[in-house]
Amino acid sequence: ALLRLRIIIIDSNETNAASLIPQDELKEVILCFSRDRWVRLHCAYEVHRPIFDLNEQLQGSEGSCDEIKLEAAPPSGVQPFLGLASYFAPLGYVYRDRVSLYSVSRLLFCQLWCKLNVMSSCRDTLLTVCKTFETLLLQVHPALFLHLVSIGLQPLKVAFSWIQLGFVGLFEMDQLLHLWDRLIGYMDPSILAVAAAAVFVHRAEALMRCATESDASLVLVEGSRLRIIPLIQMFLYKDFNIPKSVT
């Protein structure tokens, strides 16, 4: 329990810079989420294998222990991890009321974000979204993909955290919320794969000049000036002259 609390505190401290929520309130929101049984019952996927406490026993009418209650630890069934606060903090720009903030964040995790925190081959989960990203980038700009691999940078190594955490930490807040608006509207995590591929293609000219992995990483870490919706539109509708052999 102390370890889980420590992780929540560290995570809320690191994520607080991207939020209007005071640090203590963000920590309280994450703690409420961790202790909320509703999450475990309504999550689309089981993110973590629950740890059960077999010591809690229900007392019968005569005071005897007649059955054992399986209680998940934590009750939400989601073990705290670094990055969990990223799903809550940006919504502080949308909801000033903490009850609304928590309710919406909880629902989004159960319907959307849990898909990006589970190892599954099902559609729209983390593995398939990552595969979609690699396929898109390889088809649209194979020269860039192969160049990055040749200098020791696997594109997915950079894009993985973007996809899993919904681009928190890369985009400015207004651009992040524009992306989340589309993501929530379609309820399709594949949009994150398109966004990640669009960023790579947008940076292609600079990346093709990079000779080392560290140089390429520095090009990709800066996203403050990116305008994500125009980038996605350009990526989807521009004619990249893709050879028929790779389509």
Image (cartoon, rainbow, N blue to C red):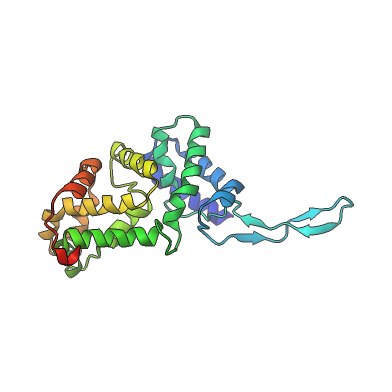
Residue at (73%, 60%) from the top-left corner? 55
The answer to whether residue 94 is seen in the rendering is yes
The answer to whether residue 212 is seen in the rendering is no
The image quadrant of residue 92 is top left
The spot of residue 233 in percent (x, y) is: 21, 44
Locate the C terminus and report the quarter of the image it occupies. Answer: bottom left
Furthest residue in direction right, as rendered: 62
Furthest residue in direction front, as rendered: 244
Residue at (28%, 39%) from the top-left corner? 175
The spot of residue 215 in percent (x, y) is: 17, 59
Residue at (14%, 57%) from the top-left corner? 207
Would you say 17 lies left or right of 202 here?
Answer: right
**Camera-side residue: 213 or 87?**
87
Locate the N terminus and report the quarter of the image it occupies. Answer: bottom right
Looking at the picture, does residue 245 appear above or below residue 47?
below
Looking at the picture, does residue 176 appear above or below residue 132?
above
The spot of residue 167 in percent (x, y) is: 32, 48
The image quadrant of residue 120 is bottom left
**Camera-side residue: 57 or 233?**
233
The image quadrant of residue 152 is bottom left
**Number of callouts:** 0
Would you say 89 lies left or right of 194 here?
Answer: right
**Camera-side residue: 139 or 54?**
139
